[in-house]
Image (cartoon, rainbow, N blue to C red):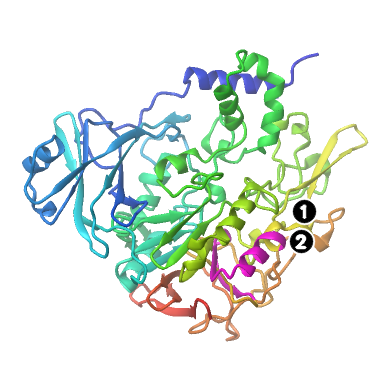
Amino acid sequence: MPRPIWQFTAILTILALLMGAMTPASATAGTDAAPVLLTEPFLQSPTKNSVRVVWLTEFAGRHHVVVVGERADELNRAELRAAATGGKIRGVRVFRARTGELSRVAEDAASQIPDPPAQITRRHIWRHEATVRGLGVGSRTPYRVVSIDGGALVASDTYTLAPAAAKGQAQKILLTSDHQSMPNTPANLQKAVETVGRIDAVFLAGDLVNVPDRASEWFDDQRGGAFFPALQGRASRTVNGVAWTGGEILQHAPIFPAIGNHEVQGRSGLPTLNESFNAPVPREVAEAAYREVARQVNPRNDPKIKERWILENSFNTETYEEIFSLPTSGPGGERWYATTIGDVRLISLYATRIWRGTGIAADPANWQRTRYTEAPATTGDPLAQGWGSHIFEQIDVGSRQYRWLQRELASKQFRDATYTVVMLHEGPHGLGDNVNPPFTDPVRTEETDAAGNTLVRYDYPRADNVLTRDVAPLLESAGVNLVLNGHSHLWNRFTAASGTHYLETSNVGNSYGAFHPLSGRSRPVPPAPWNPDNYLAQGNPGGLAPQLPTVAPLTNPAGTPLPFVQSNDHSVFSVLDTGTGEVTSYVFDLRTPEVAPVVLDRFALGA
């Protein structure tokens, strides 16, 4: 019997992996060019007397250091060179960095860079990380980073760093999500800094970029709104004739993200990064496919080759995990974790799934890969199918993540915290379009038409929504103060009877709209034979009524106050002030950039 096409594709994929068959980079910095920093330094993993400083370059270099002290800004190039190469410089301390190359980042024809390559082309980028120790609680210290490549030296501007905040030390924490190189993101971050001043930490509920393995989306997308430039005040994105630079935040404040669906890269070996991103399959499908080809791709039964094959033929978060140094949990590593930031105990969860389109062709012969259907032409190839809106990491009762969450909610660190925040990309409550279908494993139905073709469709029983059925009751019973999520690109808020507040504050770029009687919009509901009771055309599937903003809600044309912000002309940012225990959301209109943001909503945690 002829071998299925997917088996040959799988064999080619593993051979490419073993031979390192990614096209050599053409986008690396030229050897005759002066070196530059690909990012300004950013802060990670603070402790009571240390913090990690990270920066990235397009050269490996030989010397990479952080220079710390009151004289850091005064040092001339000769002194910086001496500090980087082992000399003693009065008034500063020097901390050497460890260097490693990112393993997956690349560009392709869709990359927003000058002269993008015609095919996926690896981009060589090195990450440098130094741990600065001996810091005093409550103090900020000047620092800058220095990298030397051959005889050339490059140094950052001077910024300030600090160890972890102590209990009782007031902080302003930016609550945000869904940056994704969207037009309004730099404006949102710039206005946040202009409005509240120095930001002490960032909680980012997923979707940092669009395609995680595309390097330029992190570093230098020529549209001017890449991830790091926007959060480091180095962006240049024009909206309504105004150029926005973003906010100088990460040089001074640690960032704590959660994984969104756009931090997950799909199967390797496809022609473009976009196709790869959109082609994840469930791990168990890849495991079954591996068993079919194990003798060909791994004749010695090497467990490392097996794991790599399965990962490359399912999905991964490797680029996200390589860029950031985050707290880790036993079962989840950096993918879900908990940490204390001053008075706040933060729990970051991995709760997301692949996004699929909603369209369903009237003729099943024309079905495509959507959240509800498969393309009939792919039903004989498990790795080519979409498998509906499948969940990347289980979080239902009994799963590893759920059991870990139960332990964390019962921990002394959680119980002793003044404020408790749970962050996840997809939340139990929301008015956005992405709450359909319910957050549950797709139920697969296979049928055969009159011509003998296999037709596949997926159902999502509303009663099995694990976020509303399993996660929300657990969080509320533990007394969590705030649940932060993103995903639907709007602002809305809900309050449970327990006092737990649910906030989505991701109106920083393109809004996908609110689906509520006051918006006049309805979500698409799949036709028969799908059960319409499983899919909500309007409102919140979690059942809570949306809270009207407490200060200055926007209104519809009839003057009715709205419990959401869905306008692409308006942008919202939110800040948790641990000194007051309040979360304040600000709104501004990008059509009138001279008008300062106003307070949209304010509520107190624990109230």
Q: Which dot marks residue 535?
A: 2
* Label 2 vs 1, first from the N-terminus: 1
Q: Amino acid at mark 1?
A: Tyr
Q: Identify the residue shown where x is 40% and y is 60%.
A: 202
Q: Identify the residue shown where x is 64% and y is 67%.
A: 429
Q: Is residue 309 above or below residue 447?
A: above
Front residue (pair 221, 467): 467
Left or right position of 83 against 11: left
The N terminus lies in which quarter of the figure?
top right
- Please give the range of residues in magenta: 469-496
Q: Position of residue 122 (x, y in %)?
A: 42, 30
Q: Nearer the viewer, mark 2 or mark 1?
A: 1
Check the image and name the residue furthest to the bottom.
559
Q: Position of residue 241 (x, y in %)?
A: 35, 64
Q: Identify the residue shown where x is 73% and y is 60%.
A: 524
Q: Amino acid at mark 2?
A: Tyr
Front residue (pair 414, 194): 414
Mark 1: few/some/many CA within 10 Å (<14, 14-19, 20+): many
Q: Identify the residue shown where x is 77% and y is 33%.
A: 379
* Residue 486: in magenta span: yes
Q: CA distance from mark 2 to mark 1?
A: 8 Å
Q: Is residue 85 above or below residue 547?
A: above
Visible in this render: residue 339? yes
Visible in this render: residue 156? no
Q: Is residue 434 above or below residue 212?
A: below
Check the image and name the residue furthest to the right.
450
Q: Kindly indicate the quadrant of the structure image that contains residue 578.
A: bottom left
Front residue (pair 52, 187): 52
Mark 2: few/some/many CA within 10 Å (<14, 14-19, 20+): many
Q: Secondary structure at mark 2?
A: loop
